[in-house]
Image: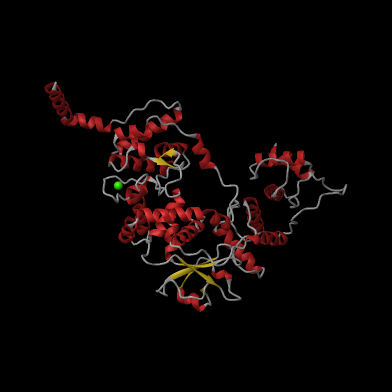
Amino acid sequence: MARALLMAVLAATAIACNSNFVRAQTVQAPTFATSGNADFDGWRDDFAARAVAQGRDPAVLRRLLSGISPDPSIVTLDQQQPEFVSPVWDYVNNRVTDRRIAAGQAMKASMGSTLTQIQQRYGVDADIVLGIWALESNLGQAPLNYTAPEALATLAYEGRRRAQFENYLLALCQMVERGLATPDELRSSWAGAMGQPQFMPDVYLTLAVDWDGDGKRDIWTNNADVAASIANYLQNKGWRAGEPVFDEVRLPTGFDFSLADGSTRSVSDWEGLGVRRVDGGAWSVTDRTLQSQLFLPAGANGPALLLHPNFAVIRRYNNSDRYALVVALLARAFEGRGGLVASWPTQVGSLNRDQTLELQTLLNSLGYNSGTPDGLFGSGTRRAVRAFQTDQHLAADGFPTADLLNQVRARAGVSVDPPASSSSEGPRALDARGVRELQRLLKRMGYRLGAADGSIGPATRTAIRSFQRRRHMDVTGRATSDVLEQARRAAR
Ligand code: CA
């Protein structure tokens, strides 16, 4: 028996040593059973052939891509746009919670000296690492409902960002080829972000860390590997050891709010402009030449923060001011320090997506370029708001409020609540059924509005105004019989 086995092994070795055979094996693209979707199979087979030509292992490709079909729930999530962008204070308060603070402190205690060693090795505050970990995966408690091969293959096949997602798949293949992770470990978000730090495969390959030295970079179940990987990421993106993230400040009376436009000045220069720590105490930074920027997350009436360079490093993890702010606030809380001193100006209200769309459209019509209206408040819209505020002698904080929208409406000659048409002369106001028909026609013509529900919200008003402008009608934003008539003609 043993002899027969030995002969078989020798025979196999002899075959494997035949160089022609080896070459034939390595260039052979893997074959797959059909997924039931011929289009997907076509992409998958083509991708696998190209991957093998680039040196990827056919056996690994087969293991990763066998039994996979495109997941429609992933495509839906990818195409979904948030209907509502929550106010910054809700975003912060929903994430900096007592429960999460307690969980972070418990994790800190349970990891003990390992976390300290990781902090020493990478020069990144352990509390910042914990803050990111808490936001990305609730310190490993958040379920990862997808697998990276399926998520990445679905998004590559979908095609909107095919090259990008094919590259992720190639990196995923290398992770397995190098033995850093096994195919059954690759749990991810719907977007293919893996494990507790939510790394994409290319980031994993370059920055994930095997802290405990078992040969695997286990960002799914090994807390030390997770924490070290996040710390290594921040160090790689330029984290400055020992420096704080921000100082909360108070501004002098008559302060020029347009200085909070993202431009940087030294801490000394800010001090020269009358900016002080909110508690009147000493700066958290020792180096007064540090280039910092003033940030008003909720405009002139809310907290004011002097952001030091490490704030921008957190944004390299997730490119969002509010994300970086929450990480920094969680880190403070884990250390046992308090939150912001100033309170959020919840009374000013914040704009939803429809209102932001209306604001952008109106600002554009007034000559303040806010870019293509999309309902999302970005830097272009902020600049346009600031320019409008400056011209109107308002505090130029670039922050959108309900009051600001009303001022813009007034300048644009748009009444906030158009009076119902009671006159028998002129166009007749539509009833709900007429409004619904108009909404359906506008949607068919590509105007952006929500459900055709027969009620007139800001999005419908904005769409009507755009339509009226295009048809050279009076721009009233009102749903009237003449608008419906024009829409019927235009949609024909
Ligand atoms: Ca490990």
The one nearer the camera, 349 or 360, is 349
Tell me the quadrant of the picture where the C terminus can be found: top right
In the image, residue 255 lies at what x, y percent?
Answer: 58, 74
Q: Quadrant of the N terminus?
A: top left
The one nearer the camera, 125 or 433, is 125
Residue 475, compared with residue 64, is above or below; it is below
Residue at image coords 35%, 48%:
204
Q: For the view shown, which residue lies furthest in the bottom direction?
A: 272
Q: Is residue 249 above or below residue 217?
A: below
Residue 233 in picture, x, y percent from top left? 36, 55
Give percent across and percent down for residue 350.
63, 57
Q: Looking at the image, which residue sits at the far left?
A: 3
Q: Does residue 419 appear in the picture of this structure? A: yes
Reply above or below: 271 against 320: below
Say whether residue 366 is visible: no
Q: Position of residue 192 (x, y in %)?
A: 43, 42
Query: Which residue: 35% across, 54% down?
Result: 111
| Location of residue 5 by image quarter | top left
